[in-house]
Image (tube, rainbow, N blue to C red):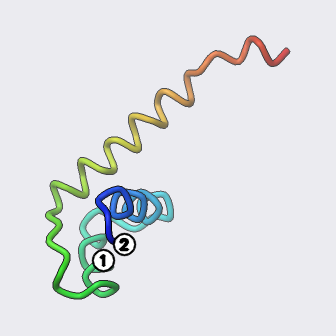
Amino acid sequence: MRRPEEFAEQVAEMYVSGVSTRKVKRVLSAAAGDKIKMSRSTVSRITERLRAEWRVWKTRDLSELK
C-alpha cells in the first residue's frame, strides 16, 4: 500500500468484511508498521464514502433491465 487510494481500498475492504473502524488502524499498523498515521476520523471518512457509494448504488434505476 503505497498510495492513498490503496489505503482507502484496504479500509473499505476491511469495513465490508466487518472490521470496525476502531480496529482498522490497528490492522493497518500491524501490516505496515508505524509508518501508517491514520486516525479514526480518517477511517470514518473513508467508510462514509463507501456508504455514500452504496446508497447511490441501491437506488439506481433498474427500469432498463426489464
- How far apart are the two marked residues, 2 and 1, measured between alpha carbons? 10 Å
Instruction: Name the residue nearer the viewer: 25 or 8.
Output: 8
Q: Look at the numbered disc 2 and give the secondary structure of its residue.
A: loop
Looking at this view, name the residue that lies furthest to the right.
66
- Residue 10 drawn at (x, y percent): 41, 65
Crowdedness near tag 1: few (<14), some (14–19) or many (≥20) residues, C-alpha within 10 Å:
many
Q: In this view, does 44 lie to the left or right of 59?
A: left
State the quadrant of the N terminus.
bottom left
Residue 36's disc is none
Q: In this view, does 28 lie above or below 51?
A: below
The residue located at (30%, 70%) in the rendering is 24
- Residue 15 drawn at (x, y percent): 41, 60
Quadrant of the rendered image containing residue 59: top right
- Tag 2 near tag 1, CB within 8 Å: yes
- Amino acid at pointer 1: Leu
- Amino acid at pointer 2: Met
Quadrant of the rendered image containing residue 41: bottom left
The residue located at (14%, 71%) in the rendering is 37
Quadrant of the rendered image containing residue 29: bottom left
The residue located at (17%, 81%) in the rendering is 35
Residue 1's disc is 2
Which of the two labelled residues, at mark 2 and mark 1, occupies the earlier sequence position?
2
Q: Look at the numbered disc 1 and give the secondary structure of its residue.
A: helix
Q: Is residue 42 above or below residue 24?
A: above
State the quadrant of the C terminus.
top right
From the image, tell me which residue sits under label 1.
Answer: 28
